[in-house]
Amino acid sequence: MAERPEKLLLLDTASLYFRAFFGVPESVRAPDGTPVNAVRGLLDMIARLVVDHRPGRLVACWDDDWRPAFRVEAIPSYKAHRVATPVPGTTGLEDVPAALAAQVPIIVEVLAALGIARVGVPGYEADDVIGTFVAREVARPAGERSAVDVVTGDRDLFQLVDDTVPVRVLYPVKGVKELEVVDVARLREKYAVASGPAYADMAALRGDPSDGLPGVPGIGEKTAAALVGRYGSLAGVLAARDAGDPGLTATQRRRLEEAADYLRVAPLVVRVASDAPVGNVDDRLPLTPVDPDALVALAGRWGLTSSVTRLLDALTSVA
């Protein structure tokens, strides 16, 4: 038997099951009529990823807290528009379609029966869990690192791209049949930034309305990338602002000064954590289900037999 590959595949799970929910018709239902389009779509995505990318390790990273307090305290508008029912003194619940919310516990049970590691940390987003796993690989001696592929529909995670490990982002364009492979060359080509950290600095300047991050008014993506390229980092841009560097126009300096309060806290919010208390995780790709009886029962109850079979066949194929 050939030695199993050791590539680490990290799934931004919520990003993928949201895409599955909106990409697979809601008419896909269990025998009792419960929608299971997100469950089946996610399982089919994982099967395709395993076959195409042949990881030796796999983690379904989880949002134990989709709107962490430390980010909300820094920028109260962070994801505020996604809160279903704002509650004073809390970060609120995410506004998720009821038909999708009902499927999340099924996903949890099926992943557990399969033996696929599912990892979340209270007070942290899945992005932070992913960032922590990536940081662990970066910290290993060069000869002991696993290549890392991060599967996400969230461009925020482009900041983790690193050719030396390597760490790539597989960004779904259409399901997982068509994935944009984001490496440093792609960051340079598409965003005019030289590294993952430079992408994060550009994103902090640009802002992101979808996450409630205002950015610096009047500084869009191209200008943000040019400033980071000229001064090396966000810290370099701010040092140039404070020093009255002639490379900044008067308008740019004024805009950066007016956004000083935002820029002071933006890095805390934009940059993913690299030290979430993840603990020790058995992330080996399961070649057979850890609880086959539970898996059979779940597949029958929820009408998942075809998707579960495809995934089991995919897992066996990398043995």
Image: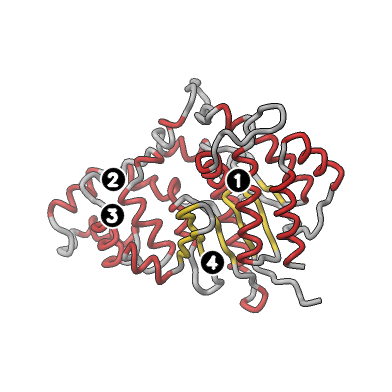
Task: Indicate left or right for 109 with 42 as reference.
Answer: right
* x 65%, y 45%: residue: 120
Give amino acid for label 1: Gly
* x 22%, y 59%: residue: 243
Cα separation, mark 1 vs mark 2, equals: 44 Å
Q: Position of residue 6 (x, y in %)?
A: 69, 70
**Which numbered mark, 1 or 4, is in the foreground of this view?**
1
Residue with the mark numbered 1: 41
Q: Secondary structure at mark 2?
A: helix
Q: Is tag 2's residue or tag 3's residue first in the polypeptide sequence?
A: 3
Q: Position of residue 218 (x, y in %)?
A: 20, 47
Residue with the mark numbered 3: 221
Q: Secondary structure at mark 4?
A: strand
Q: Is residue 232 above or below residue 249?
A: below
**Which numbered mark, 4 or 2, is in the foreground of this view?**
4
| Residue 212 sits in quarter | top left
Q: Is tag 1's residue or tag 2's residue first in the polypeptide sequence?
A: 1
Residue with the mark numbered 2: 260
Q: Position of residue 52 (x, y in %)?
A: 61, 65
In this view of the protein, which residue sits in the foreground, 69 or 313?
313
Residue with the mark numbered 4: 167
Q: Is residue 95 above or below residue 161?
A: above
Q: Position of residue 116 (x, y in %)?
A: 73, 52
Q: Secondary structure at mark 3?
A: helix
In this view of the protein, which residue sits in the foreground, 44 or 162?
44
Asked if disc 4 and disc 2 are in contact, CB closer than 8 Å, the reply is: no
**Which numbered mark, 1 or 3, is in the foreground of this view?**
1
Task: Indicate left or right for 177 with 286 as reference.
Answer: left
Q: Residues within 10 Å of mark 2 (few under 14, many from 20)?
A: some
Q: Residues within 10 Å of mark 1 (few under 14, many from 20)?
A: many
Cα separation, mark 1 vs mark 3, equals: 33 Å
Give amino acid for label 4: Val
